[in-house]
Image: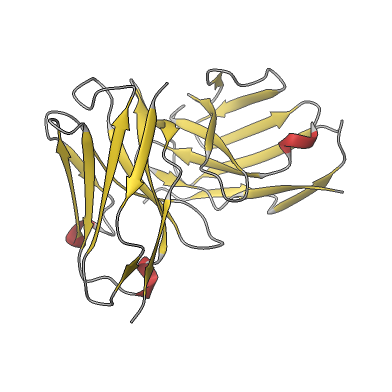
């Protein structure tokens, strides 16, 4: 099983700041990696697929990068609605990371 | 707009069978997409359960394969999930989701349904 490890577990930032989230795979998943945002009581929302392609309707302040085993989700300037939990998912064999919570500092 | 709606009992007895359906609107399960089930225990992360397409091809999470059955009903445009021999560890919000064509990540999700395993 491919294990995805996200870091940090919690990121405390202020609106307007830049957020950098990491996702590391235990073996190469090439670019078969997606990022989701989840708010309390809601289903996850697809942000990024193919490691760096934004899903339909996703603002350009969200960007993804990486390949192989190391991936990054960057939120260039945090908006109030961006405070949530973020999950990475590899769809080479379908596992999720444990999540990073982005909270208001 | 694609919409997915899960339904089924909210309470299942231990050792019983969990059975859910997902009604799809705004798209057809006979198309090129795969359709998945994903679950999330309260306060925890996401776990992929399995997927199916219109040809009946199915992939399961190896850790759940022995207890899970996923099926598709093209006449009703819905997919179904059955989990046998449930325990408290199967208590979770269960989501159905549509995969992107060409990338097996999930672009549309149902709102989820909480299933509690308890006597």
Please tell me which residue lies in front, B34 or B59.
B34
Count the marks.
Answer: 0
Horizontal arrangement in the rendering, residue B28 relative to residue A70 (left or right):
left
- Where residue B48 appears, as percent x and y from the top left, is 37, 48
Q: Residue at 33% of width from left, 82% of height from top? A: B119
Horizontal arrangement in the rendering, residue B27 relative to residue A37 (left or right):
left
Q: How is the image coloured?
A: secondary structure
B111 in relation to B75, above or below: below
Please tell me which residue lies in front, B7 or A96.
B7
Q: Residue at 40% of width from left, 66% of height from top? A: B91
Horizontal arrangement in the rendering, residue B59 relative to residue A28 (left or right):
left
- Where residue A9 appears, as percent x and y from the top left, is 68, 54
A19 in relation to B116, above or below: above
Q: Residue at 32% of width from left, 50% of height from top? A: B7
Please tell me which residue lies in front, B53 or B74.
B74
- Where residue B45 appears, as percent x and y from the top left, is 51, 55
Q: Residue at 48% of width from left, 32% of height from top? A: A33
- Where residue A24 appears, as percent x and y from the top left, is 56, 43
Horizontal arrangement in the rendering, residue A52 relative to residue B119 (left or right):
right
Q: Quadrant of the N terminus of chain B?
A: top left
């Amino acid at each position: 099983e491919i294990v995805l490890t996200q870091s940090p577990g919690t990121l405390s930032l202020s609106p307007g700041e830049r957020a950098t989230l990491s996702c590391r795979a235990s073996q190469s998943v090439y670019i078969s990696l997606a990022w989701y945002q989840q708010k309390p009581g809601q289903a996850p929302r697809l942000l990024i697929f193919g490691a760096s392609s934004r899903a339909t309707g996703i603002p350009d302040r969200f960007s993804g990068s990486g390949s192989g085993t190391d991936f990054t989700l960057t939120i260039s300037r945090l908006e109030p609605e961006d405070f949530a939990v973020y999950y990475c998912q590899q769809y080479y064999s379908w596992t999720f990371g444990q999540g990073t919570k982005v909270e208001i500092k | 707009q694609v919409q997915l709606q899960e339904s089924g009992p909210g309470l299942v007895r231990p050792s019983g069978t969990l059975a859910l359906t997902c009604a799809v609107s705004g798209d057809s399960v006979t198309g090129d997409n795969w359709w998945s089930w994903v679950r999330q225990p309260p306060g925890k992360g996401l776990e992929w359960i399995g997927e199916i397409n219109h040809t009946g091809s199915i992939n399961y999470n190896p850790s759940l394969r022995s207890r899970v059955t996923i099926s598709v009903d093209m006449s009703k445009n819905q997919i179904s999930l059955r989990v046998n021999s449930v325990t408290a560890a199967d208590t979770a919000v269960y989501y159905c989701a549509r995969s992107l064509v060409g990338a097996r990540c999930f672009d549309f999700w149902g709102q989820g349904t909480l299933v509690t395993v308890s006597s």
